[in-house]
Amino acid sequence: MSIRLGYQIPSFSYPGGVGDIFPTVVAQAQEAERSGFDTVFVMDHFYQLPNIGSPDEPMLEAYTTLGALAAATSKIKLSTLVTGNTYRNPAMLAKVVTTLDVISGGRAVLGIGAGWYELEHRQMGYEFGTFTERFERLTEALDIIEPMLRGSHPEHEGKWYSAVGTLNEPRIRDDLPIMLGGGGEKKTFGLAARYASHLNIICGASELPTKLEAVQARCDEVGRDRESLETSFLAFVMTDPDADAARSMQLDYAASLGLDLSSDDPRAAVLRDRMFVGTPDDVAQQIRDRVLDTGVDGIIINMVRNGYVPGMVGLAGEAIAKVL
């Protein structure tokens, strides 16, 4: 598996009515496929996230959306960034992602993480638990999911989950990729070293050298060749052919979150560290300098403010592909 250039769709707040939402999603996925992106991602959330919008903004269910995108695309890989483990029984999740793989002709990637959005859990009736409990659940889930994806029949009786010779048919391959997503240097990176072929690192760009050292350490602990674990970084991209328009977009986005990017507010510093702003060529250069030159293998971008505008995904993808 190789995720070198991914496109995440994190928002479904588009001009028009509800009937326009999915056609706009399809248009972005198809444009990404034409423009050099190798993977398209949606978030596995039921409410919009606080760093993007308000909880009541539109949010499509992830795997229903990916299944529909499988029919609307032909070669781009399909994944969540990332699945919240707490939202599904692990054997059921293995079945869901395997079905996506079958109907897409072998294009599914299982992105997975421990889950973190407490409001969703509380309002929708999912047990949230403690940080430690969520990672206990994730570890047990992977002990069930990984063998199911490989054609084995797991036997597991744990604190949180059980599986008894669990079947998973049909499958079209035994190497469906697992991608862990998160920034935890001990738990998330440790699970990635044990189970995953890809790790999407969630952090500020300035933190990447330290994060990559931690990835190396976790691989060393389990005797894994670090080169066999791909890495990528999720970048918030604000781009426009007019650099001033891109910068204005950045300021408007920050203001919508109640932030002044010129202030000393630590939250503003965190946001700046994850944003890449300017013309498509400017953004590509920033991605090379701040991400790829640190040793990260690939880049995943989202375009919260204007990804839905026809042509914008293509401009970004074509520019970034030149620096990969």
Image (cartoon, helix red, strand yellow):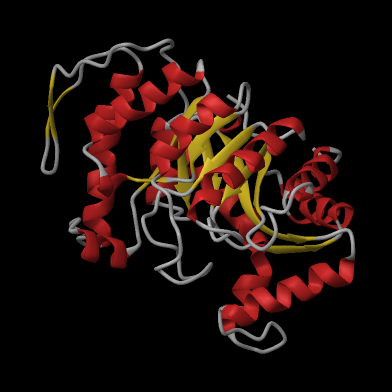
Residue 147 on image: x %, y %: 29, 20
Residue 283 on image: x %, y %: 81, 56
Vertically, is 40 above or below 156? below
Q: In this rendering, does residue 284 appear at all?
A: yes
> Is 18 displayed left or right of 32 in the figure?
left
> Is 46 displayed left or right of 76 in the figure?
left
Image quarter of the N terminus:
top right
Residue 273 occupies quadrant:
bottom right
> Is 18 displayed left or right of 119 in the figure?
right
> Is 235 displayed left or right of 84 in the figure?
right
Image quarter of the C terminus:
top right
Vertically, is 49 above or below 222? below
Vertically, is 94 above or below 10? above
Q: In this rendering, does residue 221 appear at all?
A: no
Question: Measuring 56% from the left and 60% from the top, which residue is drawn there?
Answer: 203
Residue 65 on image: x %, y %: 45, 39
- Count of numbered tags: 0
Residue 267 occupies quadrant:
bottom right
Question: Measuring 12% from the left and 37% from the top, which residue is drawn there?
Answer: 158
Question: Measuring 68% from the left and 53% from the top, which residue is drawn there?
Answer: 307
Residue 143 on image: x %, y %: 26, 30
